[in-house]
Image (cartoon, rainbow, N blue to C red):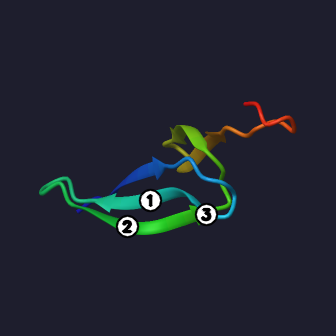
């Protein structure tokens, strides 16, 4: 069976996990945590390059004065 992954981004500071990867079963809809990626603050946008299997992520970060 072919594997499918679902990526979930979170709003967090750099001290926690920013992206969670789940392996999904398309037959029964189950999702199982397969990996976590830390030190990624406030992951906002995702894009996947299917040819090279690269996940691109954009995260929000506050300026020095505390504004986005």
Mark nearest the camera among 3 and 2 is 3
Depth-wise, is mark 3 or mark 1 nearer the camera?
3
In the visual, does 28 lie left or right of 34? left
Eyeballing the image, is 10 above or below 44? below
Whether pointer 3 and pointer 1 mark residues with C-beta atoms closer than 8 Å, the reply is no
In the displayed structure, 63 sits above or below 53; it is: above
Front-most of 65 and 19? 65
Q: Residue 64: x, y in percent?
A: 87, 39
> How dense is the environment of label 1, judged by Cα within 10 Å: few (below 14), some, or many (20 and up)?
some
What is the number of the mark on residue 58? none
Residue ID at (67%, 64%) = 15
Does any portion of residue 3 appear in the rendered image?
no
What kind of element bears circle 3?
loop
Q: Is residue 35 left or right of 42 when viewed as pictured?
A: left
Of all residues shown, which one is farthest toward the left? 28
Residue hosting label 1:
21
Front residue of 21 and 50: 21
Query: What separation in Å lies between label 2 and label 1 (alpha carbons)?
Result: 6 Å
Circles 2 and 1, Cβ within 8 Å, touching? The answer is yes
User: Around disc 3, counting alpha carbons within 10 Å, would you say few (fewer than 14), some (14 to 19), or many (20 or more)?
Assistant: some
Which of pointers 2 and 1 lies earlier in the amino acid sequence? 1
Pinpoint residue 57: horizontal percent, then vertical percent: 61, 43
Q: Disc 3 or 1, which lies upstream in sequence?
A: 3
Q: Secondary structure at mark 2?
A: strand
Question: In the rendering, at what x and y percent does residue 9 appear?
Answer: 50, 48
Task: Name the residue carrying label 3.
Answer: 16
Tell me the residue that label 2 is attached to: 33
């Amino acid at each position: 069976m072919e594997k499918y992954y679902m990526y979930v981004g979170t709003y967090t500071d750099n001290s926690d996990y920013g992206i969670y990867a789940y392996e999904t079963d398309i037959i029964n809809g189950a999702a199982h945590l397969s990996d976590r990626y830390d030190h990624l603050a406030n992951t906002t946008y995702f894009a996947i390059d299917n040819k090279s299997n690269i996940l691109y992520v954009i995260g929000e970060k506050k300026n020095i004065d505390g504004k986005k």
